[in-house]
Image (cartoon, rainbow, N blue to C red):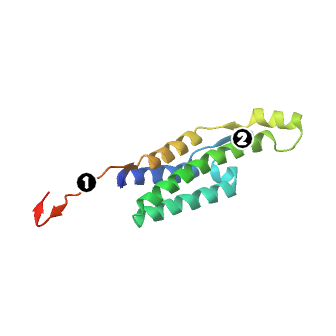
Amino acid sequence: MYILYKPLAIIGTSIVALSAVFCPFLRVPLIGNWNLYQTDMRLFLITYGLLGICTFLFFIRKIQAFRIMTFVLALWAILAMVAVYFTINNYFGFKFIDGILSKTIHFKWGWFVFFIGIITLMVSTKKVQLKEPVQETDGMLA
């Protein structure tokens, strides 16, 4: 059986939702800091879709499904970070230009805040062992 710590889940959901919009994920020269939406709209929409599913499962109290979706969201976040890294390093297909591009575009602290929110979501559920139920035999407790 799983127990859900509701305040921790709400804090984690808020951190993930706010960090994707307000925290800088990339530093692009001449343009400035980019959040997740400016980095890649598809990554942003899929991330918010998975977060919406997690929130929906939280509100309908499907704790095991919520736990699974938080792990899916964590895997998606890792995949998104790897995808952004490879996009930066292989954007044009020319080694010289991609080398210059990868040296000028840098990851920012928004990824750290984003992953803190996801880890908070992941630790908001806990598996507990139930004690064995009391069995009755012939009207007397065993």
- Give how far across and how far down residue 19 sits, in percent: 54, 48
Going by the numbered disc 1, the residue's amino acid type is Glu
Circles 2 and 1, Cβ within 8 Å, touching? The answer is no
**Depicted 57 relative to depicted 22: above or below:** below
Give residue 85's mark: 2
Dot 1: element: loop
Going by the numbered disc 2, the residue's amino acid type is Tyr
* The N terminus, quarter of image: bottom left
- Give how far across and how far down residue 142 sits, in percent: 14, 57
- 71 vs 52, nearest the viewer: 71
- 111 vs 53, nearest the viewer: 53
Left or right: 29 with respect to 72? Answer: right
- The residue that disc 1 covers is 132
Q: Is residue 51 visible?
A: yes
Dot 2: element: helix
Determine crowd level at label 2: few under 14, some 14-19, many 20+ residues with C-alpha closer than 10 A. Answer: some
